[in-house]
Image (cartoon, rainbow, N blue to C red):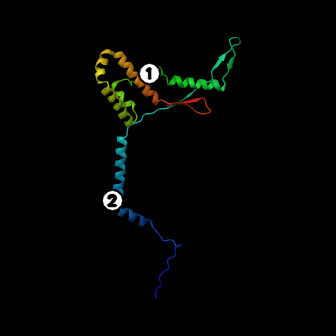
């Protein structure tokens, strides 16, 4: 008489590599289909995403040193407060309107096509366009008279001021703690 084998949970069943290969062969079409769907979804998301261009730089702020007018020796004097003022001065200079104006001119961001490219987010661009359209609707009658009165220089200056304000919001300058470095991005 044959005995029924008793199930032993501690006894391992032998699995072979061929068992895995059989399962993979059975599901080959499903695996290929899932792979193709993932690749297509990735390609679609990549091409639909708006590009975000960002650059950053680390700048070192050196100690201010001067020489004595009598002896000609170097005098290094910089307290914590003076160092903080130096950093704040440099940060304000980097985000000042003349510096940003030179940046806009150097990168040719003041051309017609590039005004829309400053908006990083699609939603922010739509909101900006909506605000512009509402302003035009509210001042419809005044616009005809204003266009005659405002010359091209004032219009260009207004556009430049808007570009400067937009760029100023996108530039960040910060001190790296316990160093003499600034991070500009």
Q: Residue at x 34, y 32 (%)?
A: 130
Rendering quarter of residue 10: bottom right
Relative to residue 103, is residue 131 drawn left or right? left
Q: Is the residue marked by circle 2 packed among few (<14), some (14-19), or many (20+) residues within 10 Å?
A: few
Q: Nearer the viewer, residue 152 or 185?
A: 152
Residue 49 lies, in percent from the top left, at: 37, 40
* Direction right: furthest residue: 71
The x and y percentages for residue 146 are 32, 18
In the picture of the structure, the residue carrying the numbered disc 2 is 29
Q: Farthest residue in the bottom direction?
A: 1
Secondary structure beneath label 1: helix
Q: Is residue 70 above or below residue 27?
A: above
Q: In this rendering, which labeled residue sits more in front, label 1 or label 2?
A: 1
Proximity of marks 1 and 2: CB atoms separated by less than 8 Å: no
Q: Nearer the viewer, residue 171 or 75?
A: 171
Number of marks drawn: 2
Coordinates of residue 13 in the picture (x, y in percent):
48, 71
Frontmost residue, 113 versus 170: 170
Secondary structure category for the residue under label 2: helix
Q: Quadrant of residue 167?
A: top left
How far, Cα to Cα, is label 1 from label 2? 59 Å
**Percent of width and height locating residue 141:** 28, 22
Q: Residues within 10 Å of mark 1 (few under 14, many from 20)?
A: some
- Disc number for residue 101: 1
Question: In the figure, residue 103 lies in which quadrant?
Answer: top left
Tag 2 or tag 1, which sits nearer the N-term? Answer: 2
């Amino acid at each position: 008489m044959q005995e029924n084998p008793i199930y032993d949970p501690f006894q391992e069943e032998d699995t072979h590599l061929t068992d895995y290969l059989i399962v993979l062969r059975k599901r080959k079409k499903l695996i290929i289909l899932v792979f193709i769907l993932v690749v297509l979804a990735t390609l679609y998301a990549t091409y639909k995403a708006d590009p975000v261009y960002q650059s950053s730089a680390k700048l070192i702020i050196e100690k201010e040193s001067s020489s004595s007018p009598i002896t000609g020796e170097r005098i290094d004097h910089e307290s914590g407060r003076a160092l903080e003022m130096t950093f704040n001065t440099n940060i304000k200079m980097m985000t000042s309107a003349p510096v940003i104006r030179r940046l806009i001119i150097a990168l040719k961001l003041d051309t017609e096509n590039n005004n829309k490219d400053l908006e990083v987010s699609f939603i922010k661009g739509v909101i900006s366009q909506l605000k512009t359209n509402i302003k035009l609707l509210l001042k419809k009658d005044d616009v005809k008279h204003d266009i005659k009165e405002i010359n091209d220089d004032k219009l260009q200056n207004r556009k430049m001021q808007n570009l400067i304000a937009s760029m100023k919001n996108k530039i960040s300058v910060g001190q790296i703690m316990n160093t003499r470095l600034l991070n500009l991005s």
